[in-house]
Amino acid sequence: ADLKDSHGRTPMSYAAENGHETIFRLLIERDDVSVGSKDSNGRSPLSWAAEGGHEEIVRQLVERDDVSADSKGSNGRGPLSWAAKRGHDSVVKLLLDNDRVKADS
């Protein structure tokens, strides 16, 4: 359930990016899935979910201790930056309300 494709992406990464909450929940409950896994560009499922504006998925990921809330990809962008770039106000607020997210990330 945690196999990476040629881009280093996992099923969790794609579920987070596309807002597939049911699939996301099935994957997040498994012990053999790394929810903080990064792809070839250094992006995590949290980064993809934030860019897509998928608030519930972002909420579940940012609350986990095994997920880096400020993790940046190879382009230097973190989840907060992606959410702001795409205009996802509710995701930006959710991230800023979390103590583990720095406003300058």
Image: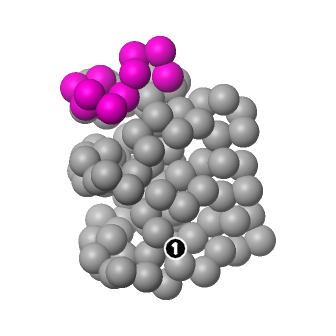
Q: Which residue is mark 1?
A: 11
Q: Is residue 45 above or below residue 74?
A: below
| Residue type marked 1 | Pro
Picture coordinates of residue 66, whole percent (x, y): 38, 56
Judged from this view, the residue extending furthest toward the front is: 65
Residues in magenta, as a range: 95-105
Q: Is residue 61 left or right of residue 9?
A: left
Determine if the magenta segment contains residue 74: no
Q: Of residues 31 and 78, which is closer to you in this image?
A: 31
The residue sitting at 53% across, 33% down in the picture is 78
Judged from this view, the residue extending furthest toward the top is: 104
Determine if the magenta segment contains residue 96: yes
Residue 84 seen from this side: yes
Q: Is residue 43 above or below residue 26?
A: above
The residue sitting at 64% across, 40% down in the picture is 73
Q: Of residues 70 and 75, which is closer to you in this image?
A: 70
Picture coordinates of residue 6, whole percent (x, y): 77, 71
Quarter of the image holding residue 20? bottom left
